Amino acid sequence: MELSDLKTFAAVARTGGITRAAEELNTVQSNVTQRIKALEAEIGTPLFERHSRGMALTGAGKRLLPYAHRMTALSHEAVLAARDDGEPKGPLSIGSMETTAAVRLPPLLADFHRRFPAVRLSLRTSPTADLVAGVLEGALDGAFVAGPIAHADLTVTSAFREELVLVSARRWASLAELRAGTPESGPTALVFRTGCTYRQRLEQIFVEFGWPSAARFELGTLDGMIGCVAADMGVTLLPRVVVERSAMNGAVTMHGLSPSHARVETLFIQRRTGHQYSALSGFLSCLTEDDIIAA
């Protein structure tokens, strides 16, 4: 069983399709298709069900996936451990939610780069669900995600505490006005793609407000999200500090929420392994020394 086949299998399982997996793996679709077929032939059973919207795991695929994650992660860790001589250097791949990357990380990344210039740091932004999968699979060395996270294969460090606010166009001065001035189904929910924790929490809020059937509109960038809110296209849920630091802050209104909805903790997650390699240890030392919430 080829490790490259397992990596391709895990990418297709995560993205739900050949095209998206090929883009993520920086290869052509035919190569992804060939590797999946080779793996299915070796195992002797289909791993995916093909349908019009993409591909879904079969029962065999679901059983194989945890082993694929472990084997690819172990391979990644083995390479890092062999190269690690105690001096932070080489590649380090960190993931983050876009909101955290935009506001919280620049000082931390700048400090890390000054202290450890031999480390080649890369940053990938994605929703929490994709970041967790990336860390478990070994594609990411660590990631900033929205809590809570509980997984036996992950260690968790508290990083930031955020206050979430409901964000609307400027003309809605209060939640009462927003609820009175929108259709019975509620305003359009402007959200990041599935897997975003803030999206899940906004959908819970909409249910409590009596808007379970409100329309959803997905956006891919933070600036696009706030810009569409300012244009009164809908409402969204974001950390207060993100909105306050936006150039469009004056064009939107922030509505406070109850503590159960507003409080969220950003966590730094990494795989639970026997070897703590130097580049990641250096990154964690910057996280602690910046007096972000030490765990």
Image: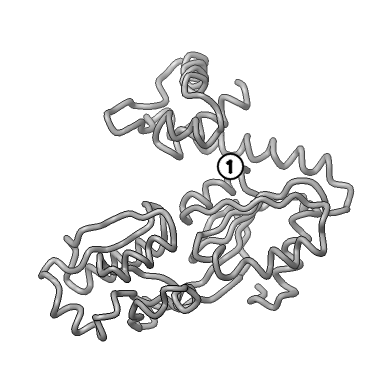
Between 53 and 236, the one lying in front of the other is: 236
Q: Is residue 145 left or right of residue 75?
A: left
Q: Is residue 177 above or below residue 75?
A: below
- Quarter containing the N terminus: top right
With respect to residue 265, does 70 lie above or below? above
Q: In the structure shown, which secondary structural element does the residue marked by tag 1 occupy?
A: helix
The image shows residue 138 at horizontal and vertical percentages of 63, 43
- Viewer-nearest residue: 44 or 276: 276
Circle 1 sits on which residue? 137
Left or right of 72, for residue 114: right
- Asked if residue 257 shows in the view, the reply is no
Displayed quadrant of residue 45: top left
Using a 10 Å C-alpha cutoff, classify the residue at mark 1 as few (fewer than 14 neighbours), some (14 to 19) or many (20 or more): many
Quadrant where the C terminus is found in the figure: bottom right
Q: Residue at 68% of width from left, 39% of height from top?
A: 74
> How many callouts does the rendering have?
1
Using the rendered image of the protein, determine whether residue 262 is visible from the camera's viewpoint. yes
Q: Residue at x 69, y 35 (%)?
A: 75
Q: Where residue 240 sits: x, y (%)?
A: 45, 78
* Residue 246 image offset from top left, x and y in percent: 47, 73
Quadrant of the image occupied by residue 166: bottom left
Tell me how the rendering is colored: one colour
**Up-down relation of residue 212 to residue 219 (above or below):** below
Q: Outermost residue, left direction?
A: 184
Where residue 145 appears, as percent x and y from the top left, is 53, 61
Q: Is residue 89 left or right of residue 206?
A: right
The disc labelled 1 sits on which kind of residue?
Answer: Glu
